[in-house]
Amino acid sequence: MDASEICLLWGNLQIQKWWSCMSKSEWSGWAQAIGVAVALASPWIKEKIDKYRARHVARDVYLQSLRMSKVANRLDAIISNASSNPAVLNQAHQEAIPIIRSLREITDFEIEALRLYSGVAASRLRTCGALQAKISGVLDLPMDLGNRHFALQIMMDEAYRHARELRKHINEAVILMEASGLNVRNNLSDMENER
């Protein structure tokens, strides 16, 4: 052991290992190397921790999206039937309004949690929120009683275009979430065990 070396004090002081006694410059080099490694690993570790914390929210968004997919498919079928069969316009309009209002908009917090798993699915769900608002706005437009049938036809044609797009986006979001590992069929037992 050289007098200029600094040693770690553990174990038998008579037997010092080569790695426990180093000069100041060697200790400095190791400290810098460890510091660089920690600095480089920090963003990756933070991302993993954030993703771990967000997994419950992302799984919940997946479950909501599955429900939304069924509702969007039903809404599209009702509106599409009304567009092709004018005799059911009024009935379809009355059925479509509560259906579109029953869809819960995904919050920004939920979108951000999902973004950690699938950015594209999060983008699709954000678009779905805008489409829900458009459909709801179209279906709630006031109608002239004299031209009610004509107004309903135009209204349902516009709602049909948005409903078809809503169905497409929500189904794509579900597929993307399943591809990113949020498939509840595989993770359902894990979720029940965690509760």
Image (cartoon, rainbow, N blue to C red):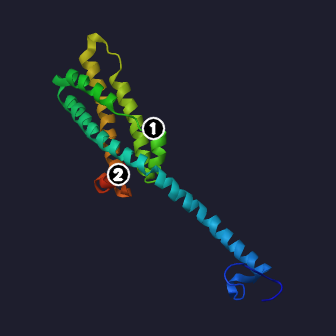
The residue positioned farthest toward the top in the image shown: 146
Residue 108 vs residue 80, the one in the foreground: 108
Tell me if residue 140 comes above or below residue 164 in the rendering: above
Classify mark 2: residues with Cα within 10 Å, few (<14), some (14-19) or many (20+): few
Number of marks in the image?
2
Q: Secondary structure at mark 1?
A: loop
Residue 100 vs residue 38, the one in the foreground: 38
Residue 175 vs residue 61, the one in the foreground: 61
Classify residue 59 as left or right of residue 164: right
Q: Residue at x 44, y 48 (%)?
A: 114
Position in image of residue 166 (x %, y %): 33, 39
In the image, what residue type sits under mark 1? Thr
Q: Secondary structure at mark 2?
A: helix
Identify the residue position indicated by label 2 in the image. Answer: 191
Tell me if residue 31 comes above or below residue 112 in the rendering: below
Classify residue 14 as left or right of residue 41: right
Identify the residue position indicated by label 1 in the image. Answer: 107
Classify mark 1: residues with Cα within 10 Å, few (<14), some (14-19) or many (20+): few
Position in image of residue 18 (x %, y %): 69, 87
**C-alpha span from label 2 to label 1:** 22 Å
Specify the quadrant that holds the N terminus. bottom right
In the image, what residue type sits under mark 2? Met
Q: Earlier in the sequence, mark 2 or mark 1?
A: 1
* Residue 31 - label: none
Closest to the camera, between mark 2 and mark 1, is 2
Tell me if residue 25 comes above or below residue 46 in the rendering: below
Classify residue 192 as left or right of residue 86: right
Residue 58 vs residue 139, the one in the foreground: 58
Q: Which quadrant holds residue 80?
A: top left
Position in image of residue 193 (x %, y %): 34, 53
